[in-house]
Image: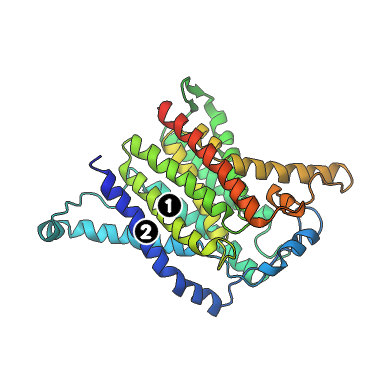
Amino acid sequence: MNHLAPLLSYLVVAFLLTFALIPPYLRLLWKYKLWKSIREEAFVGKATEFAKLHKNKAGTPTMGGGVILLSIGLLVVGSVIAVYFAPEIKEFFGVNLRFSLWNRNETYLALFTLASVGAIGLVDDYLNVRGIGRTKGLSGRVKMVLLLIFWAIGAYWFHFKLGRTGLDIPFFGTVSIGYLYLPFFVFVLVAMANAVNITDGLDGLAGGILLMNYAVYALICYDRGLFILSALCLLVVGGLIAFLWFNIKPAKFYMGDVWSLALWANLAIMALMTDTLLVLLIVSGIYVLEILSVVIQITSKKLRNGKKVFRIAPFHHHLEALGWSEETVVMRFWLIGMVLSAVGLVVGLMGK
């Protein structure tokens, strides 16, 4: 309990800083015309029905997730400076600062993931707002190759450097899969990173679910004594709360790939560091549904001469096409996300 108050202070500070940064950040997005282009190409063929449903969103600024990255970066640097002046801070304020958020054992991998995968998303977002490329952004193939390279490096690190060879199944122990750990690692994480990106299609949808995911991992990391990693999770939670204030319908700006890709990639790293990949799959149930709907739609179009299973894929757009309001889809997906997060938390804490 001694760690709880300072940890929660990170959430509060991240919220206040991000909330303060968003208005000038929004003005910057408007100044440089960094706003959303509605895609005209579907995974197979033209996205005509999608364009009809979301034509009113054209011109809304994107790359909004960058402000959370900026906030986290400032707080990490600030924590390093604060620890450097720890004796003076203790003398004047009576607060003993021992560790910064820049920590080799706990946060190096997570911060590297946010920066590197965020860079991929930043390029994709910039190409989108400038209308560059056939799909107005990085093609799915190029994005896949870049993510494969990143996760291949990650698989090598966890397998050969950290000695991971299996999956920890709560209540049953570790199931060793040897070298199959490498392709399994890459497949799951590339698929899920794309799933989160696909889910980021309605105002507040991905942001709200990611907030729940990070709250779960803040508690799991805390339970495992990874207090600095837990603090980093709470920075994200605080930033996402501020982001959602401006992102719920009508959204003032969108998250963009710069953050949706980086956020989930970072969450995956935390799951691997805490041996809770099964928990990650549980709390990611909405993302699994979304990516499966896209796979089913593409397969159906390829094998059935263009015939579709869903009006639009991913599934949240299908529900819109059936007449569900955007708010209804988001709220009900949030409710499902809450249940999945609660189940994942129970499994993560009981299966330690």
- Percent of width and height locating residue 29: 53, 74
Which three-letter amino acid code belongs to the residue tagged 1? Val
Seen in the picture, residue 172 relative to 210 is either above or below; the reply is: above
Q: Residue furthest top?
A: 172
Which three-letter amino acid code belongs to the residue tagged 2? Ala
Q: Residues within 10 Å of mark 2 (few under 14, many from 20)?
A: many
Q: Residues within 10 Å of mark 1 (few under 14, many from 20)?
A: many
Quarter of the image with the N terminus is top left
- Which tag, 2 or 1, sits closer to the chain's start? 2
Depth check, front residue: 294 or 131: 294
Residue 237's label in the rendered image is 1
Seen in the picture, residue 181 relative to 206 is either above or below; the reply is: above
Picture residue at 20% right of the left edge, 52% below the top: 97
Q: Residue furthest left?
A: 91
The Cα–Cα distance between marks 2 and 1, rounded to whole angstroms, is: 8 Å
Residue 333's label in the rendered image is none
Picture residue at 29% right of the left edge, 61% below the top: 78
- Percent of width and height locating residue 87: 13, 57
Q: Secondary structure at mark 1?
A: helix
Quarter of the image with the C terminus is top left
- The quarter of the displayed image where residue 80 is located: bottom left
Residue 14's label in the rendered image is 2
The answer to whether residue 12 of the structure is visible from this angle is yes
Seen in the picture, residue 297 relative to 18 is either above or below; the reply is: above
Depth check, front residue: 335 or 53: 335
Picture residue at 46% right of the left edge, 54% below the top: 114
Picture residue at 65% right of the left edge, 55% below the top: 142
Q: Secondary structure at mark 2?
A: helix
